[in-house]
Amino acid sequence: MAERSGYSRAAITFHWLIAALLIGNFAGGLLMGDLLDSADPAQKRLGFQVIQLHKSTGLTILVLSLMRLVLRLTTDRPALPGHMTPTERALAHLSHWGFYGVMILVPLTGWIMVSASPLGFPTIWFGLFEWPHLPIETSKAVSGSANEAHELLAYAGAGLLALHVAGALKHHYFDRDDVLARMLPFVRPRA
Amino acid sequence: MIRLALLLLAAAPAAASQWTVVPAQSSLGFSADWNGQIVQGRFPRFAASIRFDPNKLAEARVDATIDLAAATTDDRTVNGSLPTADWFDVKRSPTARLQLTSFAPGKPGQYVARGTLSLRGAAVPVTLPFTLAMKGDRAVMTGEAVLDRRAFRIGLASDPSASWVGFRVPVKVRITATRAG
């Protein structure tokens, strides 16, 4: 596949849009747990509202990520800088594909957990329409396992994010290449 | 022949204590505590066979069938949960049946009915105190029974400790009926 000099506008949009939604939803997931565990009924009610928001955002991430995966598999993208060692290249690929795994599997496990839950609680996408449950049997065991996978994968995603940000800053400040700049919107890559 | 006619006349008052529900002026509602907030629900579809004569309470009987699939609340998320297996489980038991077989008088115009409510495969004794206003061939009955969802194993997989949904479920009945025949 030919390599281009910078990321396409679509790739940049997907990157930042999904990043913002992922970080927001990670925070929402943590907040939701605290609210639902609260003894205050008003906090619990708020928790259920956050659940609806969290599910709506998560499913949006799932759809956007699948679209992004198609874009990733079908279009050219810029090459990694020439100075990178084979190990660094392998790590970069691993973390990027790891992100795709997280972006797709975290919402998917969330969807499984909600669909199998005996609570039978529907997902109303941003209050607009009812998002269907996956056609799976109601099972507390399945829902519980999906819940655990959902959380573990989300934390793995947070770890990847730390690695990703550290990598981007290293490229920018130590390697002084255009790896960070070429993903920033409104910034022209270094010549 | 005349004797037979007299017998039929004597039997007539029994038929006269039969009542027909006026659906437009009747309602069956329930409420549940949902995180400190009361969610109001209703069963818009039910049918009842009512035999009631204040002077013949021993013969009074009510047999009602309630369509659980039609149950609805003002909360869309609750509506999504209601028909599922852990709640009303409408696939396996689409209707509830209320059979009232014992009526005791209280203060004037007040009674206490006792019987059985069958729901989700459980037959549970219920007590329904009610007031009755009869005027000619028209009667208005209002009453409230408090049920415990645990007795019917409702929501036990989702919330066995009432962390979100209370155990007590008051059911409000308002029936307008006209004398049949």
Image (tube, grey):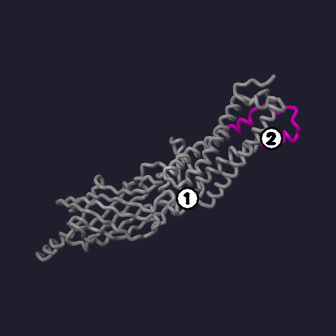
Q: Residue at x 24, y 67 (%)?
A: B52
Residue A13 forms part of the magenta stretch = no
Q: How many marks?
A: 2
Give amino acid for label 1: Pro
Q: Residue at x 76, y 31 (%)?
A: A180
x and y, in percent, of residue B48 in the image: 32, 62
Q: Secondary structure at mark 2?
A: helix
Residue A24 horizontal side relative to residue B33, left or right: right
Q: Which residue is mark 2?
A: A93
Q: Secondary structure at mark 1?
A: loop
Crowd band around label 1 with a 10 angstrom C-alpha radius: few (<14), some (14–19), many (20+): many
Dot 2 and dot 1 within a common chain: yes
Query: Quadrant of the image for the N terminus of chain A?
Result: top right
Q: Residue at x 28, y 64 (%)?
A: B130
Query: Bounds of the magenta span?
Result: A66-95
x and y, in percent, of residue B81 in the image: 50, 54
x and y, in percent, of residue B19 in the image: 25, 63
Task: Kindly indicate the quadrant of the structure image that contains residue A72.
Answer: top right
Crowd band around label 2 with a 10 angstrom C-alpha radius: few (<14), some (14–19), many (20+): few
Give amino acid for label 2: His
Q: Which residue is mark 1?
A: A118
Residue A68 forms part of the magenta stretch = yes
| Residue B78 shows up from this direction | yes
Q: Looking at the picture, does residue B148 appear above or below residue A35?
A: below
As drawn, which residue projects farthest toward the top? A191
Q: Looking at the picture, does residue A146 appear above or below residue B125?
A: above
x and y, in percent, of residue A30 in the image: 62, 48
